[in-house]
Image: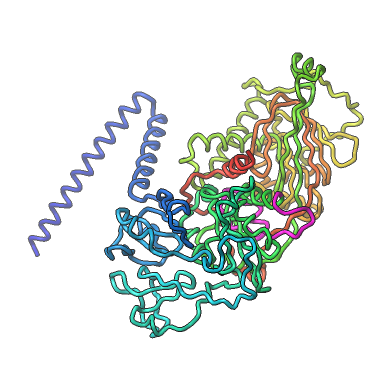
Amino acid sequence: MPLLFSVFIDVLAAAINIFSAVRSICAAFFSLVERLFGFYGAVSFTAFLIALFVYLVVSVFFPRVSSYTPATSQWNASKKQRNYEHLWVEGDMILLDHGQGPAYCNACSNLVVSGITCLICKRCAHKAHHHLVEDMPCKILYDDKISDGNSNDSPPPSREVSQPHQWVEGNISLGARCAVCHQAAGSEPTLKDVRCAWCNVAVHTMCCSKYRSKCPLGPFPESIVPPHLVRRVSKQQRGATKKADPRFLVAALPDPSLQPLLCIVNPTSGAQNAPALLRSLLSLVNPVQVVDTSRENPEALIRAFEPVLSRCRVLVCGGDGTVQWIISILDKVIPEGQPRPPVGILPLGTGNDLARVLGWGGGWTDETVIDIVRDVIAADAVNLDRWTVEVETMESSLTGAEKMGRALHLVPKKEPKKFVMNNYFSIGTDASVALEFHEARLLQPQFFRNRLLNKVWYALLGGKHQFINVLSWMGILKPSNISTPELYGSPITQAPGNQKPFPLLSSSEPALLSTPGVHEPLSSTELYLDADPHAIDLTDIGAVIILNIPSYAGGGKIYSAAEADGHPPSRFDDEKLEVLAVVSPLHLGASVVGITSPGVLGHARIIRLVVNAPQVAMQVDGEPWRQDGPCTVSITFLGKTKMLKRNESLLTDVADSDSDGSDTSPSSDQEDLDLEIDDEE
């Protein structure tokens, strides 16, 4: 005992000496940096080094599991056609574990610490044993005895064809019990006992022959397409069309109670852990009902179920940009007037405003996927207004050579830009902040992997714009974007009596918010609502925000104060838009958090903006861009689409996840839009 105490004292003394030495080195380093950059510069540099050290430690010792192995299991990778397909992901098995416990190799039965696992059948293996487990069966996608790719083949007359259990050895979830003897299963530290890849029932190896129950396919059999209803499309048939080529086809659903759930996952949206989400979805439904947008075009999934789309429900796992992308695919695939499948949302983006309004929350946190799927199946279908935003460059912005070429029909007229809006449109200072945030995220995506920190970045960039506003108002900073109509050869001919000035703020609101932003480009912009010929002068406006839903900038109830003051309520199905105005970034931030309210310009079905500025920032549903001017912006009603709204009677605990932490993979809803553009090209 005295010897142990003596060793402890020696170790403690050594630790104190090491700490003192490190402290002396850090103090000397700080003094050196302070002499070079001053005290505040030394503090900033030291804080940066500490943050960099923490980032490197987390990246090295806590790697995220998001990288896929080479696609050796594609359908054309083997000469032998198989009716299954593995989806391998590599990484640390501890990070992949979601209640499964230790992982054991299905090839050598040894413990796997870092290796590969199939997200569909949950087989695990060391990386060196990939070739040994590749040919082990996975979830059957279609019945090759019934489906041979012939368009004349018809599915069985009913859904009475039973699907046998698909047993997979080992790697059983913690706490599982044998369905025969009801004793603990998979508790031994080895590859032992079996479980069904479809219904996930666990059975002891010795009890397997005694188990006689039919496989229900999963917890939601009415949403699962059984393999005997799936037809494989041959390569010859896929090559005969220029459309997105589906590898499978579901031509009929004999069972009237069958309502397939189509799941579309965008792993780049919102920086979530894609393998964990995919693993949960693939375990609940037939893998042909799930598509990863980083591996396959989601249009192929929609076309695979095209004959039965009216019976389906669609679950979009992504941000607002992903939702818009999938709705545009439905517009392309489904003829006008035909019934459309309702769309539900599992929010993965940064803002997720549409998901908030429909009751799906501000982001996917720790809620189990099985609960979300259950709520999607029970959700109510509602109508969502959609709007067309058309941006057209005015003729006055053409150069002399372009005008001459236009007169001689040598230079074609510029086609207007067209967008579809579901959530909101804005122009001015808030779009400038969103654009600056987006450009910074494209340059350094590793600094924008957390939903809460993204909002901090937004606040900092908004503060920067407000600071520029104040300096411009004080005359310290020369305005860099002063825009008067005379500069562009198109003076405003509207008589002063025909222009309706907009009262920016009431006398009861803080004067600090009314800081004239003379550097903002809206100082020569006019607004027309519906058929009113009188323009609203936006000279003192910092930004115009046009809302279709009562949520803005990641859950901000920016219109709630106006509703309390007696303005009409904001609805997403009333075919009306709310037109709001803020004078500065500070006014916008205060309105989002509820300290004050924006000015209400009106409610309209047709909106037209005339922008006389050389350049202005705009955004549609959080996707910003820089628009050259002068230009006109027209917003008109497009139609309605079906969405799924969470049933409030079943909503037990849907907490807002604004304070959610860990987002890990590159976050960019703009990538959703890029994918859509690439597909169209």
- Residue 377: x and y, percent? 63, 68
Pick the residue in front: 407 or 93.
407
Corner quadrant of residue 438: top right
Q: Looking at the picture, does residue 565 appear above or below residue 177?
A: above
Counting the numbered discs, the total is 0
Q: Tell me, yes or no, whether the highlighted magenta stretch contains residue 355.
A: yes
Q: Looking at the picture, does residue 361 appear above or below residue 226?
A: above
Q: Would residue 31 be visible to someone looking at this image?
A: yes
- Residue 190: x and y, percent? 28, 70
Residue beneath the point at 11% across and 56% down: 7
Pick the residue in front: 182 or 288.
288
> In the image, is 678 to the left or to the right of 215?
right
> In the image, is 393 to the left or to the right of 189?
right
Give the residue at the far left of this rendering. 3
Residue beneath the point at 70% across and 58% down: 643
> In the image, is 608 to the left or to the right of 532?
left
What color scheme is it?
rainbow
Q: Tell me, yes or no, whether the highlighted magenta stretch contains residue 493.
A: no
| Quarter that holds the N terminus | bottom left
- Residue 432: x and y, percent? 64, 34
Q: Would residue 523 be visible to someone looking at this image?
A: no
- Residue 425: x and y, percent? 71, 42
Pick the residue in front: 382 or 410.
410
Residue beneath the point at 76% across and 46% down: 387
Pick the residue in front: 333 or 499.
333
Which residues lie in the magenta part?
Answer: 332-359
Residue beneath the point at 73% across and 23% down: 483
| Quarter that holds the C terminus | top right
